[in-house]
Amino acid sequence: MNRIVSGTGEALERRPARKVFGIGENQWKRFKKVAPSYLFILPHLVFFATFVLIPVVFGVYMSFHQWDILRPEKPFVGLDNYRELWDDELWWLTLKQTIEFALITVTLNTVVSLAAALLVKQPLVGRTFYRMIFYAPVILSVAVMGIMWQWLLNSQYGVINYLLSLIGLPPIRWLREPKLIIPSMSLATVWWTFGFPMLIFLAGLMDIPTHLYDAAKVDGANAWQSFWKITLPLLRPSMLFVLVTQFIAHFQVFGQPYVMIGVGTQFTTASGYYHWTVLVYLFETAWRWYRMGYGSTIAVGLASVILIITIIQFRLLGRRLQY
C-alpha cells in the first residue's frame, strides 16, 4: 500500500486516483472544461466534413479512375489522367489565361481598394455614404454583374463605345477581340469586388496608432513618406489576407466568362478558347463531355497551383513588423 510521511513523521495512506469512465480525475476535469468549446464547433465540423472534406477526398480518388458517368465501369487508370493533363494544350492555355486574369484582377483590386480605403478614412463630408457606394456592387450576383457589363461592353450599342464615339474614337470589340477578353473581364470584376478588400484595408488603417504619424510629422516626413514608411509596412497582415483570399477567389473564376461571353461562343481566330478559364474547362470536361475522372484531375491541378501561390505569398508577406 502506498504511504506518505507527514510533517509530524506519521505515515498516511495515499488515496488512489479516482477514475471516471476509465479516465483519470485530472484528465476528466480538463475534458469537462474544454468540452463546451468542442460542442460549439461540432456543427461546423460536421458540415465541413460532409460538404468539403469528403468531396475533396472523393474527387482525388476519382482522378485516378476513368470515371465516365454514362458507364457502370470505373476502371482504375493510375496516373494516366495526370500524364494526359501534362500533355494537354488546352489545359495549359486555360491555366495561362486564368493566371493572367488573376494577376490583372488582384493587382488592380489591391490598388483600387487601398486607394478607396485611404479616401474614406479621411474626415470627409458624407464619408459613410461613400463607403456604402463603394461596397454596394459586392452584393450583386455574378449573373447580374455579367449581364450588366455585357451590355456596357457591347461593341455595337454599348455605353462605353458610345462614350468613346463622342471623342472621335472607333468602337472597340471588348468581348470579341482575343487580346481584350481577359482584361475586359478583369475590369468588370474589379468594379464588382473591390468593396470587400476596401473594408479589410480600412480596418487595418484604423488599427494603426496615430502617434506614429505625429512622430513622423515632427521628424519632417511628408504624407508620401509616411505612407511608405508607416502605413504600408503596418498593413502587411491586411495585405497578406487580401492577396491570399483574392488570388484564391479569382483563380476560380467561372461566372464572368460563362455569363459575359458564353461558353459555347467560338472565335474565328486560332483555337477559339480565348475566354476559357480552368473552371470553364473543368465544367465542359465533366458536365458536357462526361469525363468526371479527367475533370477531377483538372481540379487537383488547379488546387495544386493555388496552394503553391499561397505558400509563396505567406513566405513573402508572412513576417510581421512592429514599431
Image: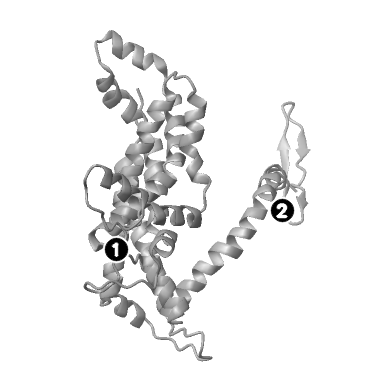
Residue where numbered disc 2 is placed? 23
- Give residue 234's quadrant in the image: top left
Circle 2 or circle 1, nearest the eye: 1
Q: Position of residue 153 (x, y in %)?
A: 35, 54
Q: Residue at x 32, y 73 (%)?
A: 266
Instruction: Residue 207: tell me if it is visible.
Output: no
Left or right of 88, for residue 253: right
Q: Secondary structure at mark 1?
A: loop
User: Is 107 in front, or is 44?
Assistant: 107
Q: Residues within 10 Å of mark 1 (few under 14, many from 20)?
A: some
x and y percentages locating residue 38 in the rendered image: 66, 49
Front-lying residue, 20 or 235: 235
Check the image and report above or below for 60 versus 319: below
Mark 2 packing: few (<14 Cα in 10 Å), some, or many (20+)?
A: few
Give whichever of discs 2 and 1 has the lower sequence position: 2
Q: Quadrant of residue 281?
A: bottom left
* Disc 2, SS: strand
On the image, which quarter does residue 11 sit in?
A: top right
Nearest the eye: 14 or 310: 310
Residue found at x 33% / y 57%: 308
Which residue occupies 45% across, 53% down?
148
Identify whether 222 is placed above or below 140.
above
**Which quadrant of the rendered structure holds the C terminus?**
top left
Question: x, y (%) of residue 254?
Answer: 42, 62
Looking at the rendered structure, the kind of residue marked 1 is Arg
Task: Answer whether residue 265 is visible to the viewer in this image.
Answer: yes
Badge number at residue 87: none
Amino acid, disc 2: Ile
Q: Which residue is mark 1?
A: 176
